Amino acid sequence: MGTPERTPERAASPAPASAPSPQERPQPQPQAPERVLRGPQARRIADRLSVQFRVPFEPQYEPRHGPRHEPLHDVRPEPRPEPPAEPSPAPAGPRWTLRWYDGPTVDAVRGALGRLFPDGTAAAFAVRRDLTTRALALAAIRETRAGAMHRSVGSWGQRYHLEQLLAGQEHPDRPSGPREAAMLERLLAAATAESTRGPAAPDLSRAFDLVARDGVAWLLPEHRLAGPADRDELALAPLEYLTARYATGVHRTAWETALAVLPLRTAVTAAHQDQDPDPEAARAALALLPALRAQLAAEIDAIGDRLAATATATATATATASTTATPAPSTV
């Protein structure tokens, strides 16, 4: 009779560990209630900043989600390792964003909030500055003159470049003078398409494309020679007028894109060699003659000083060589 086969013994399954009771788990520490700002309070703070910076500030309400709650009972069938600690969620309550257009920088407003409310009230606010079409179009004119506006990056790339450039600049919508203000208005008008439904807003992408393609010289408000009574810089100075009339090649490109003028002697010579100059070109060249005369005199003086220094050095070297070459008389 054979030996009966033995059935292999199975290892006894461990008894499931009991889940920790809710009393054994660490309880979250109670937090101090957050100070919640109401609408009238946020409005008063925005008004104080509006008075300080002379720019309208608007408080914008944004509700925030409250903290997540743990279940009251542990329903897991078996114990699991504790998950890593997560950062505590944002406290419940409203969140206010102060928004304004152009005006002061974000850092300036944050600093003002900290000084006005050192008790921590400023922490309830986010700050955001939006740039208007005027500010971005004005920056496009300036960057075109600096040679930094390129059509290859597209309008979004151009806008991103300008926004980064203006981040630390206060009041980016303010022109530097009457001429720049007039150039900005002409660009905005050219970038505004006609609409049968009422007033249309300027197309920022079209404004970018216009200055990147055609430069900025066409935006000049007046192309006449400035007279003695012109004090607003709208008309052209004598050298600008001659450049606009006679520049060619790379000088023409530099004038159209950056308003770069011709060298003084080149401009006057071009007017002199013009077989049929207009009266304004002749007046512009005559107005530049004193400056050209002073420039030529300075160049002649510099040439004379250099030649005199060379002649003196040569004579000194020759005399020294002659003295060295002459033998001293012998004494007997």
Image (cartoon, grey):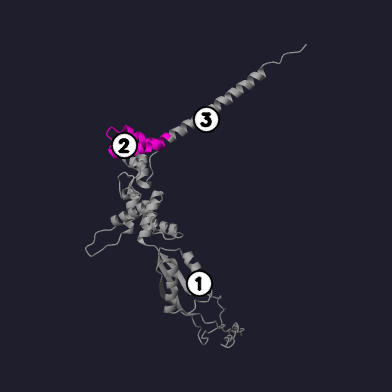
> What is the C-alpha distance between the residues marked 3 and 2?
34 Å
In the rendered image, residue 246, in percent from the top left (x then y), is placed at 32, 38
Q: Amino acid at mark 1?
A: Leu
- Rendered position, 297 above or below 133: above
Identify residue for label 3. Answer: 305
Which secondary structure lies at badge 3? helix
Along the viewing direction, whichever of 133 and 173 lies nearer the viewer: 173
Kind of element beneath mark 2: helix
* Pointer 2 with pointer 1, Cβ within 8 A: no
Give the CA distance from mark 2 to mark 1. Answer: 62 Å
Indicate the quadrant where residue 5 lies: bottom right
Q: Secondary structure at mark 1?
A: helix
Q: CA distance from mark 3 to mark 1?
A: 64 Å
**Disc ID at residue 229:** none
Residue 301 in view here: yes
Relative to residue 315, is residue 208 depicted above or below? below
Are the residues flagged by discs 3 and 1 in contact, CB closer than 8 Å?
no
